[in-house]
Image: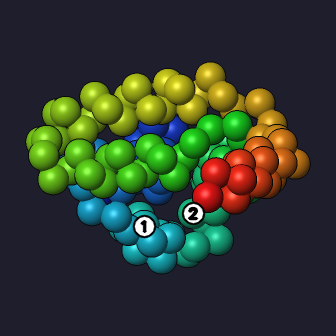
Amino acid sequence: MTMAPDRFEMFCLYYLGLNRVGEYRFLNANQIAREFNWTVGELMGTLRKLNLHPDTVLNTDFPMARHQVDVQLAADRFGPPDLQDMAGRIFEEFTRAVGRKRDWLGEIEREREADRDAKRNR
């Protein structure tokens, strides 16, 4: 990879482990930075400019971990074109979610309620 990635390409690479042609290979931040001859700081700066910084994603009401697992599992069954289509749908969903804050307290309360229900049903 030589040209700087656009927002979709960076989303795919950093969060879904898909390169420009849709091949799956999860890379950590150091490996991604090396792909572009950047420092990790430059990578994080680029993510921030693209509104893809991990802080933004973590605090967005969007199930990123679920989608990461979905892509990882799909990579064993589907080829790059299908993975790129899947990534496009995930990216569109993420783009619509940006700006919706994650309800951390609500999530904790729902987990507690689920735990209480599970204990009652034992």
Instruction: Indicate the quadrant containing the N terminus: top left, top right, bottom left or bottom right.
Output: bottom left
Q: Nearest the camera: 112 or 101? A: 112
Q: Name the residue under label 2.
A: 43
Position of 6 compared to 121: left or right? Answer: left
Residue 63 vs 14, above or below: the answer is: above
Label 2 crowding class (10 Å Cα cut-off): few <14, some 14-19, many 20+?
Answer: many
Mark 1 to mark 2 CA distance (whole Å): 8 Å
Q: In which quarter of the image is residue 110?
A: top right
Residue at the image position 48 percent from the left and 47 percent from the top: 66
- Pointer 1 and pointer 2: residues touching (CB < 8 Å)? yes
- Mark 1 falls on what kind of element? helix
Residue 5 appears in view: no
Residue at the image position 62 percent from the left and 22 percent from the top: 96
Q: Nearest the camera: 37 or 66? A: 66
The picture places residue 74, in percent across and down from the top left corner, at 23, 45
Whichever of callouts 1 and 2 sits on the residue coming sooner in the sequence is 1
What's the coloring here?
Answer: rainbow
Residue 28 vs 100, above or below: the answer is: below
Position of 10 compared to 44: left or right? Answer: left
Q: What residue type is labelled 2?
A: Leu
The picture places residue 23, in percent across and down from the top left corner, at 20, 51
Q: Mark 1 points at which residue?
A: 32
Q: Residue furthest right?
A: 105
Residue 25 appears in view: yes
Q: Which amino acid does label 1 sit on?
A: Ile
The picture places residue 115, in percent across and down from the top left corner, at 71, 56
Q: Nearest the camera: 112 or 107? A: 112
Q: How many labels does the image show?
A: 2
The picture places residue 114, in percent across and down from the top left corner, at 70, 49
Residue at the image position 66 percent from the left and 28 percent from the top: 97
